[in-house]
Image (cartoon, coloured by chain):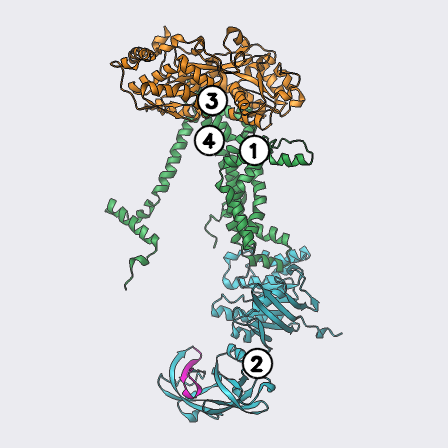
Amino acid sequence: MNTHSIPAVSASNVEMQFPGLLAVKDANFELDNGRFLTILGPSGSGKTTLLRMIAGFLKPTRGEIFIKGKEVSAVAPNKRSVGMVFQKLALFPHMTAAQNVAFPLKMRRFDAKKIPARVSEFLNLVRLDGLEDRRMNELSGGQQQRVAIARALVFEPDLLLLDEPLAALDRKLREEMQLEFRRIQKELGVTTINVTHDQREALVVSDQIIVMDHGEIQQDASPTQMYRTPHNPFVANFIGVTNLFVGQLAAVSGEAVDVTIGALTLSGILRSSPETAVLGAQVRCAVRAEQIRISAALDALGELDAAFQGTVKDVIFEGERLLYELSIPELGDDPVRIFHHDQNDFATHDVGETVHIGWMNRDMHIFVAP
Amino acid sequence: MQRSPSSYPLMWRVMDALEAAFAAIWPKGGGKYTPYLMLTPAIVLVGTLVVGLLYIGDSSLRTLDKSTFQFSEFWTLENYVRAFSEPFIFTVVWRSLMGAVIVTIVTLMLAFPYAYVMVRTPNAFLRKFLLIALFLPFFIGQVVRAYGWLIILGNQGIVNDVLGLVGVEPLRLLFNYPAVLFGLVQYMLPFAVLMLAPALTAIPEEIEAAAGSLGASWVETMTHVVLPMAKPGLIGAGLVVLTLSLTDFAMPAILGGGTQDFIANAIYDQFFRTSDQGFGATLALLLIALGSMLVGVVFAVFGAGTLALDGSQK
Amino acid sequence: MPIDKTFNRRQLLKTTAAVGAAGAFVASTPSILRAAEPDKPSEIIVRAWGGPWVEALKNGVSDRFTAETGIRVIHDLTEDNEIQPKVWAAVAQGRTPPIHINWDTTTNATKSALRGVCEDLSDLSNIAGTTDLAKPVGVEGYPIVNTYGYVYVLAYRPSAFPDGPPKSYHDLLDPKFKGRLAFYNDGIGFHFPAQVAGGGSLDGIPDAMDPAWEFITKMKAQNPLLGEDPDFVTWFQNGEIDAACTISTNALGAKKNGVDIAWTVPDEGAKFDTDGLWIPKGHSEGDLYWSKAYINSALTKESQQIWLDGLGLPGVVPGLTPPPGMAGDPAYPTKPEDFERLIRISGQVQVENESEWFSKFKTIMQG
């Protein structure tokens, strides 16, 4: 049997039923060796519950979890080879940085003589050399993160779990640590499962993303797939800023479909399964804010499949981009949101100004409403 | 900007009123000294204690003349010589000291799991039960509880009745050293649990989960993580139990059957039975010194910082 | 006469007045108590022991006093040994003492007398009608008036002594009594019989008491319980002990509670002691006068009879009728031959050596 065919982690029909709450329903996924998986979802989506089942802190009420091909539902956390970085880090305040990192080695009965060398190797890896003897209250937030990573990795676990450890950090430090996680993960090649509600973090660090909502896996795909071909409006809306319009299916020709939105007829790509694509069915049409072009003059927009005229209701300056909110009555009452990224184009549009917008048909995702 | 005064926290208003009162008494204003005036009640209280101690110190240096039952006009160290040379005093001091140490160790050993379960159990009913079981004896005074033990452990008590059912002759469970220690442990347990519970609550459950995922068994998590992190609570509870046991009067008096005097009982005898307040004062000062030394030793061994008193804890 | 030195002129004057008034009072014709009387206080405070003790005092003395004089009597149940430092402090600081009359053990009262905090009571008219027992031993005059005597008997459970009452404290050394005996926790009442049981003589008190300590050491091997008055009743009731050296009143109390109990004076003898009444210094003339009148009334035959019926103890006026069942009882000595087997040591010797005896006893028992 080819060892490559055994996934590092897999879940089969996993369910977690709390009293009065079904936290995880029928979860199935596979994660290959050395890959970085992010479970993405809003709070209460069941992502942390799923992670805690993988860590062994919770026992699934149904289904099986395999780590390196071994079913682990009945295995205690300390008998699993899983390193975890906790949301609040859970560092031992009564120990120094080095003692924290040495802790799993001692508990896992490593050769005592080799422990100091291993500890300093991992402190170097996370760039904490020189701070071995500091206690936790003498380290900065970022340094504490690094101790927690080193502690979770030092015993070379089969699997590294990250339970939103970056959530409490400020944005700059968070982005820095995201790259740091990615660097260390690549360097060691350790299979990693990360939990977050930050879609940007998920896109930046992951090889594979699972989006969860209401205890259910919505989509399991690579970041680019997830971004380009969302399976449902929830995923489309959760990853990036997406405009959703309600319409009816007017024509189907393979993936290419026509929809009517009010008096308009527009074309897009069908993302729901073809058998649901019944003519006249209600659909949701999703267009990402960054895939809509905006300009004062229609000519400046270049080639477009769909073009509209609208009024600027609000302009929000976000640094590297501008967010416009436009009123376009033909597309419904909700404002249409558009990102404007062109840093060389200093032309901005004022509130009340009439502007032209448009997009390509391939950027409009059509979902048949269930 | 309009803000109604009622939106101020109550404490601010109390402070404002106090400041206004100070200003009225001392119109020039204490300036930066005003805050120190707030310490006045505490200083008066401590000062009263110090004056009392000075009186006791003075008494301890005077001997009783048994032909007039008056105390000597001059100071002498005779009472101290007597305290250090009478074998009975040595016996009583040693018994109190050992008793306090044993009671402290046993109480902490029992209080820790009790507090741990109370803090950690997800079962609300169990937590409430443990809390009630903890507080109920608090409402019953020490003396009443001791008398309760007389009834339960007596020759015709419940325990001996049960033993009688299986054919065991009545056992003398009372009026000995173990009975006194038993009564003290039972008395101290709520104090210890109440002091330990906040210390355990302060340890995030995540830390225990972390220790588990890092490979520690439950026992290792307890010994390497929970116990060291609960150290301030354990030291605090230990100090309370140690000093309360060392100075206890009622348990030795009631459960000791007159044969298990602690220092407090010896002091009582001197004050009220033999009318020798001088020697009683000497023993009282020795008790204070002994207690302070014990606290000092605990601090020396574990460090004052263990009580989180050094202000560096975040 | 040394007595003159201890009394000042003011006291003598007061005394003179009191004698007349008290005499008139005893004549029991209140109508003629007039001109010489100081103002009556509305109440006087008498410290007493609780339970049957205060009940007996109330019936025998206090209620009768109130009926005669209209002065209310308040009973303060503070422990005798706890009121003592308060009274001493009050007298030392020139304050009015918290009580008017202290019902006290003669030994404790003697300490107060030696300290000089007691008013002299020699002028009470009814002292003339009392036996020698009323006179405190080892102090000058009457700083205290003893009001009755009591015996530290050897109380026992007859079922534990099938061959008849224990004849001697040596009988208690039988191994079957291990853990089944009780003494006072300071050994009071047992020191003197132990001196005899150990082969010593009463003349050896207080200077040659080794025999007592040797015998007490033997007794220690029996692991006796050590307690105070209420403990003995409880222990007999709960079947914790078979024999105890205790005041007869406690044994009587246990018997009244239905416990099968008897008592005896063993061959070694039994300590006989007295309780008394005294007045702390520092009261106003009127309060002192009426406090003295109270004590004087306690020495009348009628008051003694009712009071001591309640306590089951022998009084200090001749001709009292023994309470039911107590006639001829060793705990109720009345005739000189009754006293032959009882040990009476002067209050002064006791107060001077008591703390040493207590601490010796405790050293042995708690060692």
| The quadrant where residue A323 appears | bottom left
**Distance in Å between CA atoms under marks 4 and 1:** 32 Å
Label 2 in the same subunit as label 3:
no
Give the percent coordinates (x, y) of residue A122: 61, 63
Q: Which of the two discs, 2 and 4, sits closer to the camera?
A: 2
Give the percent coordinates (x, y) of residue B1: 28, 64
**Distance in Å between CA atoms under marks 2 and 3:** 94 Å
- Whether residues under marks 2 and 3 lie with C-beta atoms below 8 angstroms apart, the answer is no
The chain whose colour is green is B
Identify the residue under disc 1: B150
Question: Relative to the observer, which residue lies in front, B188 or A222?
Answer: B188
Identify the residue under disc 4: B285
The chain whose colour is orange is C
Q: Which chain carries label 3?
A: B
Identify the residue under disc 3: B274
Question: Relative to the observer, which residue lies in front, A281 or B76?
Answer: A281
Identify the residue under disc 2: A231
Kindly identify the amino acid type of the residue bearing the numbered disc 2: His
Give the percent coordinates (x, y) of residue C326: 52, 15
Q: Which residue lies furthest to the front in this view?
A: C324
Q: Residue at x 47, y 67 (%)?
A: A170
Instruction: Answer left or right for B133 relative to B23.
Output: right
Relative height, residue A357 to residue C88 (above, below): below
Q: What stretch is highlighted in magenta?
A: A319-334
Q: According to the rendering, which colour does chain A have?
A: cyan
Kindly identify the amino acid type of the residue bearing the numbered disc 4: Leu
